[in-house]
Image (cartoon, rainbow, N blue to C red):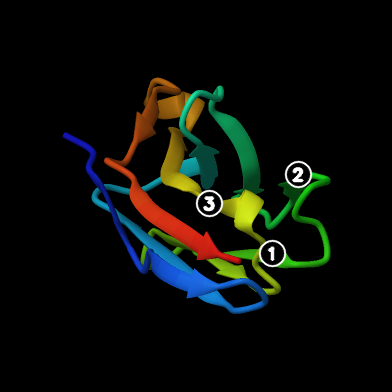
Amino acid sequence: QVQLVESGGGLVQAGGSLRLSCAASGSLFSIMGWYRQAPGKQRELVATITNSDGTNIADSVKGRFTISRDNARNTVDLQMNSLKPEDTAVYLCYAKRSRFLGGNDYWGQGTQVTVSS
């Protein structure tokens, strides 16, 4: 059973930085990344990265957030700089298994990020 465990959320002032980390049990994930969901809003993509380091980053965080992954350790990190109050949300780790292993999607429990103005 695949499990995703996030860490690194918390409370920060606007303009500050946080780093989120996610560790996955198992291996061979074609895509890993982060989504977020704010109260009363739909879940939205923040950033994803493929196993060949191709990235997809939301326009709202481009230039401020950086995603990276370690394929050997099955981890994905999100470095968040210049945080804004509108970045406040629960951030969820996401991983998609390689299609050779079924292509299933997996989600972490989420970690709260709160940015105060």
Q: In this view, does 31 lie above or below 74?
A: above
Mark 3 lies on a secondary structure that is loop
Q: Residues within 10 Å of mark 1 (few under 14, many from 20)?
A: many
Q: Residue at x 44, y 57 (%)?
A: 113
Direction from residue 6 to residue 71 in the image, left or right: right
The residue that label 2 is drawn on is 58
Type of the residue with mark 2: Ala
Q: Which residue is drawn at 61% across and 68% down?
A: 80
Mark closer to the observer (1, 3)? 3
The answer for how far apart the CA atoms under marks 2 and 1 are is 9 Å
Question: Is mark 1 in CB contact (under 8 Å) with mark 3?
Answer: no
Q: Residue at x 23, y 38 (%)?
A: 2
The label shown at residue 73 is none
Mark 2 lies on a secondary structure that is loop
The answer for how far apart the CA atoms under marks 3 and 2 are is 15 Å
The residue that label 1 is drawn on is 65
Which residue is more in the foreground, 37 or 84?
84
Type of the residue with mark 3: Thr
The label shown at residue 88 is 3
Q: Residues within 10 Å of mark 2 (few under 14, many from 20)?
A: some
Type of the residue with mark 1: Phe
Q: Which residue is drawn at 69% across and 57% down?
A: 53
Mark 3 / mark 2, whichever is N-terminal: 2
